[in-house]
Amino acid sequence: CNAVSVPRFCDASMAIGAPGNLGGRRRSRILLGKVLAVAVWATVTPSLNFAGAVSRWQVACPFGRGRMALEAYSDMKVGELKALLKERGLKVGGLKAELVARLEESDGDVVDVEEDDEVEEEEAPSPPPKAAQKKTGPAEYKAGQLALAKFHDDGRYYSVKLKKDNGDGSFDIVWLEDEAEDTANLEDLKPQLKDFKKGDLVLAKCAEDGRRYTALVQENKGEGYVTVQYIEDESEEEVLIDNVVKQMKKFKKGQKVEAKFPDDGEFYAATVKDDLGTGKYLIEWEDPDGSDPESEMLVDDIQRPRVNIDTFEIGQKLIGEVRRVVPFGAFVDVGAYTDGLVHVSKISNERIENPEDYVSEEDEITVWVNSIDTEQNRLGLTMVESKLGGRGGMRSREVTHPFADLQVGDELEGIVEGVRDFGAFVDVGSERSGLVHISRISDGFVDNPHDFAAEGQKVTVWVSSVDDGRLGLTMVKSRL
C-alpha cells in the first residue's frame, strides 16, 4: 500500500435507517426487542467465603440490583478467556475447553452463589460437557464505549460507539465505518476486545486496494481507529479497528517454507535462515537458479509449504487455523492449497444455530478429514471425530492429458471447476485440476478472480509449470 488514505464517511445528516443513504454497507435499523436482555460484565474478584471457606466470584449487575451470580468460565467467549489468561500471565493458546480448564485450575473449585431475595434459592444446573459449550458470556455496556453490534442483513458484527442507554434494553449507536446512527438491542451487542498497542505487529487492510498487509501499530487512541505503518513501504494509514488483526504468522530458523520470488511472483521452496524482526526474515532459496541464494523477505511473502488435498486421508487428524466463520460453518487452513470447510453440523455434538458461538477467526483447532473431492477441489472437515463420514466425493476422473505428457507452453482447453480469492482451478483432463494464479488470469490488474472466471466456464489455458504433482496454468500466453 503506497499512499496514506483516510476512510471516507457518509453525510452525518442522513436520516436514520433511510435506504440508500448509508456509505459502505447499507444499514437497516435494528428493531427493538420485546425481551430485556440483562447483559452483565463479569467483575471477577475473590470475595467472602461461604459454607466452609469456599471461593466465590462476585458479579456486578449493571442495573444496580446488587444481585450475586456465578459466572462460569465456560459461558465466556474465547476472546474473553484469552484476555483473562493473558492478564494472569498464563498460557493463552489451545482450544476453548483447555482455556477453561486452565482458568479453573488457577482459581480452584467454584460453587453456586445465592439468587437475590426475590427468587427462591435453588441449585444452579450443571454446565454441559466442555466439548459442546457455547461461547456466550455476560457483558456490561456504557454510553461512550466501543462495542460490536450485529448487522442483521449479513448476521456479522461490526464496531460501533454506544451513544445513549435508552433504559429499555437498547442503546443508540453509531456505526464506525460510515458514522450512520442506529439502535441496537443488548442481545445484539458484544464487547470489542481488540486492544492494540504501539509496536504491535498486525495485519491491516489497506484502503487503496482492499488487501491486508503487515504493519506496525503507531497509535491507538481507543476511538475505533488504529494508526499503522506498513512494513513494506513505511507509509502510514488510519485503519478501522475491524480491519486490523494480530499478525499470527511466525517462522522458525531452519523451517522449510515457500517464498514469493520477486521476479515472477511465484512461490518457491526455501529455508528460513534468520528472523530479522518486525515481520522480516532472511531466507535461502533451495534452487536460486543463478540468483542470489539469500533474500530478505516480508512475512506476507512467506507461507508454509502447501499440499494438494489428495495427499490427505479420510480420518486424518490435523491442526488448523480458522480463517472465516460463516452461517453454514467455518473455513480452516490446514496447509492445503484450499481451506477446508467444517460444516455447522460437524462443529459440535449438539445442534447449533450460530457457528460464531463456538469458533472465531484465528482460533487454532483440531479437525479430522471428513471428505475429499478432488474434482471440485473441496475438503470437508469435522471437529467431532465421531461424525466422520464416508468417502463420498472421492471420484475418479478421466485422464486425457497425463502430467507426464505435459510441457510448459502447451495450449489446452479446460473447464473452470472452482474460483478462489487467489485464482481459478481448471480441469484440463489431467490427474488433478491446474491452478491459474490470480496474477495469470488477465493482462491487467485482477482484484477479484470471480470477475474473470466462473464455475463451468470453458477457457483456453497454457501450461506454465509442471512440478511435483502440481500443474500451473495461465490464461495469458505472454505470462508463461
Image: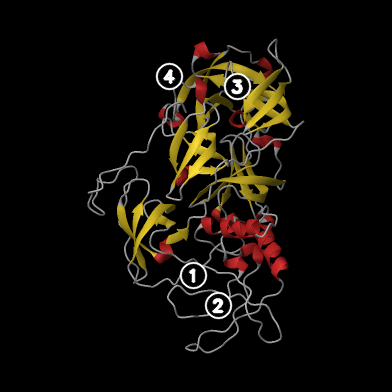
> What residue sits right under mark 2 in the picture?
69
> What residue sits right under mark 1 in the picture?
40
Say if mark 1 contacts mark 2, CB within 8 Å. Answer: yes
The residue tagged with tag 4: helix, strand or loop?
loop
Residue drawn at x 44%, y 35% is 237
**Earlier sequence position, callout 2 versus callout 3:** 2
Quadrant containing the C terminus in the rendered view: top right
Q: As shown in the figure, which amino acid type bears the numbered disc 2?
A: Ala
Q: As shown in the figure, which amino acid type bears the numbered disc 3?
A: Glu
In this picture, residue 430 sits left or right of residue 37: right
Q: As shown in the figure, which amino acid type bears the numbered disc 4?
A: Gly
Say if mark 4 contacts mark 3, CB within 8 Å. Answer: no
> What residue sits right under mark 4 in the picture?
444
Q: Position of residue 74 (x, y in %)?
A: 61, 66
Spatial separation of the CA atoms under disc 1 and disc 4: 53 Å
**Earlier sequence position, callout 4 versus callout 3:** 3
